[in-house]
Image (spheres, helix red, strand yellow):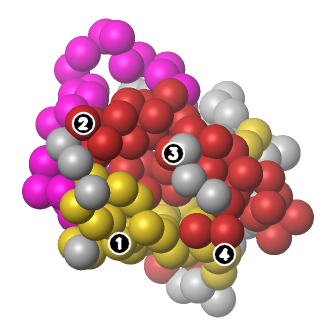
Amino acid sequence: MRIGHGYDVHKLVEGRKCIIGGVEIPHEKGLLGHSDADVLTHAIMDALLGAAAMGDIGKIFPDSDPRYLGADSLKLAQKVASLLSENGYRIVNIDSTVIAQAPKLSPHIENMREKLSNALGIDAECISVKATTEEKLGFTGQGLGIAAHAVCLIEKM
């Protein structure tokens, strides 16, 4: 058994979609990044890669590579799941938290779990997604960005 932790943060800006956990969330601002800037999926991928000691998403999908410009993070997550499988690992479970003052995420959590489940090839029951605010403190509390933490457990097959 191996444990991994992932963290990601993206700035909120006008003119971008707000995609979290593969779900487009209605909001006046979206997340800025080279790909679709899906902060939750990025944190989960980093947790999985870290658990397998395979680096991070910057190593696997560098932002200097034009192939990943505007990339769908769920498709990248599928590649991460394949890499884990090719190296003899199985995902046991994932626990994650999104930190955002706005938008309100609770109505979208089940859809996020389902999309992540499909991308990673595991049961939605094995994926926890939680959301919290920072009581208007810090960059997330001021609505300047959104952050996500994820931990995972993987095992050798």
User: What residue did someone put label 4 on?
Assistant: 131
Q: Reading the chain from its start, which is encountered first: label 3 or label 2?
A: 2
In the image, farthest residue toward the right: 107
Q: What amino acid type should be assigned to the residue bearing mark 3?
A: Leu
Q: What amino acid type should be assigned to the residue bearing mark 1?
A: Leu
Q: Is residue 109 above or below residue 37?
A: below
Which region shows up in magenta?
Answer: 46-73
User: What residue did someone put label 1 on?
Assistant: 153
Q: Secondary structure at mark 1?
A: strand
Residue 123 appears at what percent x and percent y? 63, 58
Q: Reading the chain from its start, which is encountered first: label 4 or label 2?
A: 2
Are the two marked residues, 1 and 2, in contact with CB atoms closer than 8 angstroms? no
Residue 100 appears at what percent x and percent y? 62, 69
User: What residue did someone put label 3 on?
Assistant: 120
Residue 148 appears at what percent x and percent y? 48, 66
67 or 92, nearer to the observer: 92
